[in-house]
Amino acid sequence: MAKANPSPTGLDLTGQISLLVDDVPCVIDCRGDKVVLVVADMKTALDLRRKLSSSIARLPQVVTWLQVASLTLEVEVAGRCLGQLGSEIRPNWVAKVLGLSPFHIPAKALSAALTKNFWRGRSS
């Protein structure tokens, strides 16, 4: 269970929870001032996005909450950061083109999305 530790700059969270969101497996991993949504592979991430498409309109509210709490939300797919949202994060052109404007999508995420391992998850 996540717990909040007092911090002069905002919340400091620790903990991890595994859950199913509309039958899509994911993990919420709290790492200090970063909340990470961990998804196994790109196919799972796209499935999750499709199932949560009606919630996309609420992203500005999520951004406000994250900014007030001095937190960042990061989406991690196959061990790589796919996008960031929240405190001191500004959307870039990639996110705007994809219709995910509140997010910042690193350029490395685009090149990673072209690899087979990104679609199948990490290979050991």
Image (tube, rainbow, N blue to C red):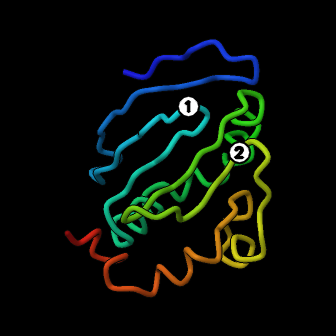
Q: Position of residue 45 (x, y in %)?
A: 41, 64
Q: Position of residue 48 (x, y in %)?
A: 41, 59
- Within 10 Å of disc 1 (Cα), the crowding (few <14, some 14-19, many 20+) is some
Indicate which label's residue lies in the foreground, 1 or 2: 1
Q: Is residue 17 left or right of residue 51?
A: left
**Image-quadrant location for residue 10:** top right
Image quarter (top left, top right, bottom left or bottom right) of the C terminus: bottom left
**What residue is rendered at 39% in x and 71% in y?**
42
Q: Amino acid at mark 2?
A: Gly
Which mark identifies residue 47? none
**What residue is rendered at 47% in x and 80% in y?**
113
Q: Is residue 119 above or below residue 13?
A: below
| Camera-side residue of 118 and 44 | 118
Residue lying farthest front? 124
Which mark identifies residue 86? 2
Looking at the image, do the residues carrying marks 1 and 2 touch, with CB atoms under 8 Å apart? no
Q: Is residue 99 left or right of residue 82?
A: right
**Image-quadrant location for residue 110:** bottom right
Which mark identifies residue 32? 1
Residue lying farthest top? 6
Image quarter (top left, top right, bottom left or bottom right) of the N terminus: top left
Q: Position of residue 35 (x, y in %)?
A: 53, 39
**What residue is rendered at 75% in x and 72% in y?**
96
Q: Position of residue 74 (x, y in %)?
A: 56, 51
- The CA distance from mark 1 to mark 2 is 14 Å
